[in-house]
Amino acid sequence: MLNKGQVFELWNKKIVWVVQKYLYDNMVNRFHLQNLELNKKDANLFFIFDIDYSNSDEYEIYLDSMSSSTIGNLMMAFRNSELPKIGDFIKMLHKKLKLNLGVEI
């Protein structure tokens, strides 16, 4: 996303990211993204889709919202995100292995 976003911004072109709402919300919350109001001048446009499960026979995909960002805004957010400590990562791996495989490590 960052590489393509940079290129399109440099070329003064638009790139459209079609993203599921759950994934978009996760990205916004995880990286504390801000300044995502729709600005058609921004190179990175986000079309956020969601799924309506109300009809048990069919799912309906619909456009939930649109937003945009500059590559500078995205890079700042990703650069400032919290990175996991190796000890925490290893503990999580052990926990997942134990749950999924029933194996003690």
Image (cartoon, grey):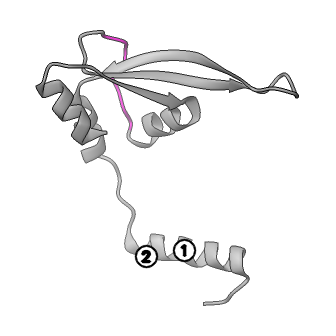
- Dividing the picture into quarters, in which one does residue 16 lie? top left
Was residue 62 drawn as part of the magenta stretch in this picture? Answer: no
Labels 1 & 2 near each other (Cβ < 8 A): no
Write the residue at 43% across / 34% down.
28
- Residue 35, percent across and down? 32, 21
The front one of 93 and 1 is: 1
Location of the C terminus (image quadrant): bottom right
Local crowd size for mark 1, using a 10 Å CA cut-off: few (<14), some (14–19), many (≥20):
few
Residue at the bottom extreme of this rendering:
105
The front one of 61 and 90 is: 61
Secondary element under disc 2, as helix, strand or loop, is helix
102 to 34, vertically: above or below: below
Write the residue at 25% across / 36% down.
4
Pointer 1: what residue?
93
Secondary element under disc 1, as helix, strand or loop, is helix
- Which amino acid does the dot numbered 2 rest on? Gly
| CA gap, disc 1 and disc 2 | 10 Å
93 to 49, vertically: above or below: below
Local crowd size for mark 2, using a 10 Å CA cut-off: few (<14), some (14–19), many (≥20):
few
Left or right, 103 with reference to 73: right
The magenta segment is: 32-39
- Residue 41, percent across and down? 23, 11
Residue 36 visible to an observer of this rendering: no
Left or right, 79 with reference to 11: right
Write the residue at 26% across / 40% down.
2
Task: Identify the mark at residue 87; answer none if there is no mark.
Answer: 2
- Residue 94, percent across and down? 58, 79
- Which amino acid does the dot numbered 1 rest on? Leu
Left or right, 59 with reference to 61: right
Residue at the left extreme of this rendering:
10
- Residue 21, percent across and down? 56, 29
